[in-house]
Amino acid sequence: MLFVKKFKNFILTEATKNINESAYILSRILIDIQKKYQVEGKIWINNLKLKFESNTEYEMFCNDKRFIQSLKQKYNTVDKTIIYNGFVSGYATYEIYIKDLFFNRVVVPKYLYHVTLKHNVDSIKRNGLIPSTNPTYGICSYDKPFIFASINKNKLFINDDDAVVLIINTEGLNNKWYKDFNFPYDNINHICTQQAIPKSAIKIVSYKMFDKNRNKY
């Protein structure tokens, strides 16, 4: 089930549909971690700050990739994602967030625009655009696969000669498009989909060429 909600008084990094629910999930995560590591935890809204007894214990946890991933698999849901931040100021501290993904369905025009770097072109020519995860994108990091695009060709993310613009023809596609959850106050320019886009629907243009002939596209 996908949730539809409009933002009003929240900033995205603190947005949560149910504070008590988020706190409960974080408390369960803390219990799971404490079964294996010597650590104290403090919960605030949708954030769990861990304080390990020693730097050694902290490093062991950070390197325990299988265990960390198992927590995500256990507690992630369709509309909720577990985010890790291991780069916290302070000795042997670590943060875990729960971030709700608020989806607003969007009716898209015929053409959308996606910017990527040139080294991705060969893969796109073979496979089209495949949803992927990116734990560092935007203010709402995520570990679920998405494709992000823009409606306005004059408001693209990358302005670089090493980039290309993918012009996506949406006619005939059955993708469901949603407002990009990183931009809750945006006037519906940045959007995302969880479904792949076939190579037949994509035209690849160098950024330099696109910028020179923007009105053409």
Image (tube, rainbow, N blue to C red):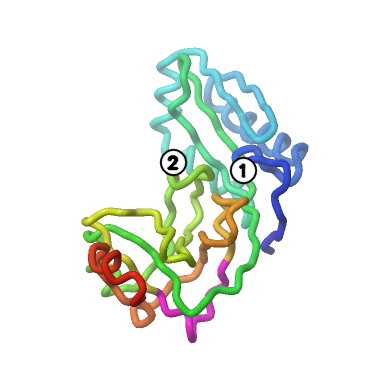
Residue at mark 2:
66
Q: Nearer the viewer, residue 108 or 82?
A: 108
In the image, the segment drawn in magenta is: 168-177
x and y, in percent, of residue 138 in the image: 47, 46
Q: Residue 107 occupies which quadrant of the picture?
A: bottom right
Does the magenta run of residues contain 170? yes
- Looking at the rendered structure, the secondary structure element under dot 1 is helix
Give the crowd class for mark 1: few <14, some 14-19, many >=20 residues within 10 Å: some
Q: What element carries label 2?
A: helix
Secondary structure, magenta segment, majority class: loop
Asked whether 44 falls inside the magenta stretch, the response is no
Q: Percent x, y for residue 33? A: 57, 30
Q: Nearer the viewer, mark 2 or mark 1?
A: 1
Q: In which quarter of the image is the N terminus?
A: bottom right
Q: Which residue occupies the foreground of this view, 18 or 173?
A: 173
Q: What residue type is labelled 1?
A: Leu
For disc 1, the marked residue is 12
Closer to the camera, 30 or 127? 127
Q: Which residue is drawn at 76% across and 43% down?
A: 18
**Front-most of residues 50 and 100:** 100
Q: Is residue 88 positioned above or below 159 on the image?
A: above
Residue type pointed to by label 2: Arg
